[in-house]
Image: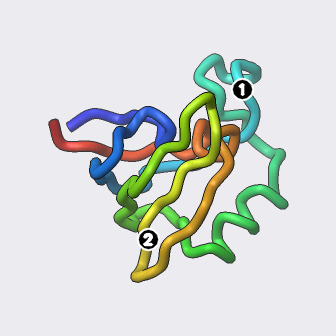
Amino acid sequence: MMELRLSDLRNGESGTINSVGVGRGRGRGDGRRVGRGWGFRKRLEDMGLTPGTKVTVVKSAPFNGPLEVYVRGSRLAIGRGMAERIFVEVKR
C-alpha cells in the first residue's frame, strides 16, 4: 500500500482517506502543518471526507480543474487545491 494525494489518482481509482494536510510545503516538510486549518477540516468533515472513508475519482478535469469524486453514495466536485491536501491509502 502507498500513500498518495487524492489529486494523484486517475479516473476510476479508489483509496481510503488517511489524513488531511493543511498548507503546501511548509511546516513539517510534508505539507501537513499542525495547528491550523480548522475551517478546511470542518468543510471536509461536512462533505463526508473523513479519515477511514473510501473515495473514488470519477473524473479529473484537465488543466488542473476540479475532481469529481464518489464518496458515501454521493458525487462531489472538489477543487484541485483541496484534493492536493487530502492523503489517501491506495493498493497498487
Left/right placement of residue 59 relative to residue 37 reads left
Marks 2 and 1, how far apart at CA = 24 Å
Q: Residues within 10 Å of mark 2 (few under 14, many from 20)?
A: some
User: Residue at (18%, 43%) from the top-left corner?
Assistant: 91
Q: Name the residue rendered at 84%, 60% in the picture.
A: 39
Residue 15 in percent (x, y) is at 32, 52
Seen at 62% across and 32% down, the residue is: 64
Which numbered circle lies on residue 71?
2
Quadrant location, the C terminus:
top left
Mark toward the viewer: 2 or 1: 2
User: How many numbered circles does the render carry?
Assistant: 2
Q: Residues within 10 Å of mark 1 (few under 14, many from 20)?
A: some
- Amino acid type shown at disc 2: Val
Identify the disc placed on residue 69: none
x then y, percent, for residue 67: 54, 50
In this orientation, which residue lies closer to the viewer: 71 or 58?
58
Residue 33 position by quadrant: top right
Compared to residue 8, the image places residue 25 above or below, namely above
Image spot of residue 59 (x, y percent)? 44, 51
Label number found at residue 24: 1
Image quarter for residue 61? top right
Q: Mark 2 vs mark 1: which is more N-terminal? A: 1
* Residue lying at the far left of the rendered structure: 92
Quick one: 66 or 56, which is closer to the camera? 66
Q: Is residue 57 above or below residue 70?
A: above
Residue located 56% across and 68% down the image? 76
Q: Are marks 2 and 1 in contact (CB under 8 Å)?
A: no
Q: Amino acid at mark 1?
A: Arg
Would you say 70 lies left or right of 86 here? left
With respect to residue 20, does 32 lie above or below?
A: above
Where residue 71 sits: x, y (%)? 44, 71
